[in-house]
Amino acid sequence: MGRVAARDRTARRRYRHGWRLAGGIAGAAVGVVLLIWTLLPVYNMVLIALDDEGDEFTGSLWPQNPSFGGFRAVWTQDHWYLEHFWHQFGNSIFLGVATMALTVVIGSLASFAIGRMQLRGSQLIGDAALLTYMLPTAILIIPFVHIMHVYGLSDSLWAVISAYVAFATPYAVLILHQYGKLLPMELDECAKIDGASPVQIYLRIYLPLMTPALVAVGVYALLLAWNDYLYQFMLLSSTRNMTVAAAIDQFFDSDEAPWNYMMAVALVYCLPPIAIYFALRRFTSFDRVHT
């Protein structure tokens, strides 16, 4: 009987192992398909950027005569569409970094007040902030343009930054408040016993322990500012103050748009958020922060 039971257990283990192996293979296959599907548009952008004639869709897997002329034109700004590219690229970086920094600062201060200082009515304020997401941001663009005109911020990067910070902060408060609940209140109480002020608790205890959530919120705010087009197009009018996202629309003003230049600009434009993400990724580990 013992041998029969042992054989049955072995068979069941092999059966479960086979199912786990099959599930792993199926999951890997689905992941590969989704990865290819996601990267296919990016690969097509690379094909167009490397095409010397800038043809949109050639139907080939690789250009017959690949050329880096599009990237060379971007680097040297050797096209009238690109004559202010690097200045606009700097505007985009400033816009994204400023939005990220202000969102993290405002969101962390608000979540600290709501969750750690336990102010009266603070929870209601945090919940009310989320009601702003009931309105699509697209329908707010006209009143926002009017408000910026009244305050003299027309054609200013700060007008766009203020819009993105206003849209990203409620989400930041929600995420940081929920993450802050994982931190024991005893840390704050011990610091108060040692004579620490709320500012010292915020700077020396709260912020270091909240680093993973702060990074997640900062990346979200950065991508929100980096990927949006509508507010940048509506609020920025002069060529020198435009960002790359708004300026690239000029390529469509021509009947024969240089698609290889356009795709080269788009690929270069993708690099900063990727670099910032990988630079900050090491701070997203909860265990690393607490060890």
Image (tube, rainbow, N blue to C red):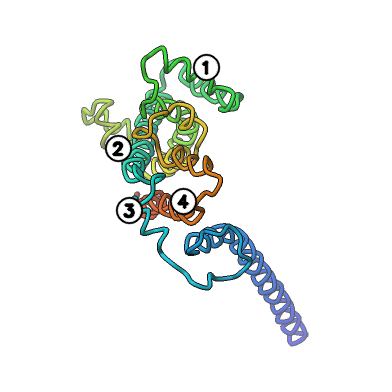
**Secondary structure under the numbered disc 4 in the rendered image:** helix
Horizontal arrangement in the rendering, residue 195 relative to residue 44 (left or right): left
Q: Which mark is residue 205?
A: 2
Residue occupied by mark 1: 143
Q: Nearer the viewer, mark 4 or mark 3?
A: 4
- Could you tell whether 163 is left or right of 21 in the image? left
Q: CA gap, disc 4 to disc 1? A: 30 Å
> What x and y, as percent, mark residue 148?
42, 18
Direction left: furthest residue: 195
**Label disc, if present, on residue 291 of the rendered structure:** 3
- Distance, label 4 to label 2, CA atoms, is 41 Å
- Real-space Cα separation, disc 3 to disc 1, in angstroms: 48 Å
Residue denoted by label 4: 266
Label 4 vs 3, first from the N-terminus: 4
Mark closer to the chain start, 4 or 1: 1
Of badges 4 and 2, the one in the foreground is 4
Residue 111 in view here? no
Could you tell me if residue 192 is visible in this image? yes
Q: Earlier in the sequence, mark 2 or mark 3?
A: 2
**Disc 4 to disc 2: CB gap under 8 Å:** no
